[in-house]
Amino acid sequence: MAGMATSGERESTRNWTFLTNHAHVLLAIARDPTARLRDVATEVGVTERAAQAIVADLEAGGYLFRTRVGRRNEYTLNPAGRFRHPAEADRQVGDLLALFADEPENGDTGR
């Protein structure tokens, strides 16, 4: 039928990304280690509860450490942590952090 998308066209227009929400949360915390999870969640586009679960995963995996400072949390990242997927297990998450953490907020790369 005219005007109907084929399954291939539908698949190509799906909303997907190369980086997972876990990577986005880690990068948001790298940019601001004192950020509230509410702000991290907003930046990443997930619920606050999802951000909490992701931080718990990252903490359990040894990718970040949480320290209580007054009523807030401060996060320290472990750049020596290894990627979990066997295809990237020889790489450290510090490589990802170095690639993305200092990215300008407006996306301007200066080019």
Image (cartoon, helix red, strand yellow):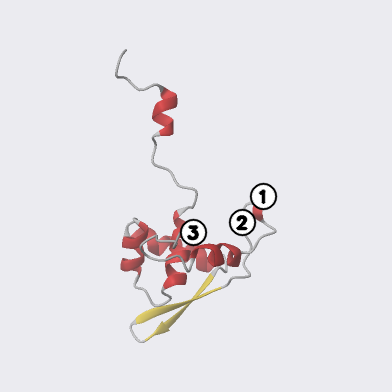
The amino acid type, in three-letter code, at marker 2 is Arg
x, y percentage for residue 97?
54, 66
Q: Residue at x 40, y 61 (%)?
A: 108
x, y percentage for residue 101?
48, 67
Q: Nearer the viewer, residue 64 or 17?
A: 17
The amino acid type, in three-letter code, at marker 3 is Ala
Labelled pair 2, 1 in contact (Cβ < 8 Å): no
Q: Is residue 87 visible?
A: yes
Labelled pair 1, 3 in contact (Cβ < 8 Å): no
Residue at numbered disc 3: 23
Q: Using the image, determine if residue 65 lies above or below residue 89.
A: below
Q: Using the image, determine if residue 104 lies above or below residue 7.
A: below
Q: Using the image, determine if residue 20 lies above or below residue 61.
A: above
Kind of element beneath mark 3: helix
The amino acid type, in three-letter code, at marker 1 is Ala
Label 1 Cα neighbours within 10 Å, binned few <14 / some 14-19 / many ≥20: few
Mark toward the viewer: 3 or 2: 3
Tell me the quarter of the image containing the C terminus.
bottom left
x, y percentage for residue 15?
39, 41
Q: Nearer the viewer, residue 38 or 100?
A: 100
Q: CA distance from mark 3 to mark 2?
A: 12 Å
Q: Residue at x 59, y 67 (%)?
A: 94
Residue at numbered disc 1: 87
Q: How many marks?
A: 3
Q: Residue placed farthest to the top in the image?
A: 1
Q: Earlier in the sequence, mark 1 or mark 3?
A: 3
x, y percentage for residue 49?
34, 60
Residue at numbered disc 2: 84
Kind of element beneath mark 2: loop
Q: Residue at x 39, y 37 (%)?
A: 14
Is 47 placed left or right of 59 in the picture? left
- Give residue 8's mark: none
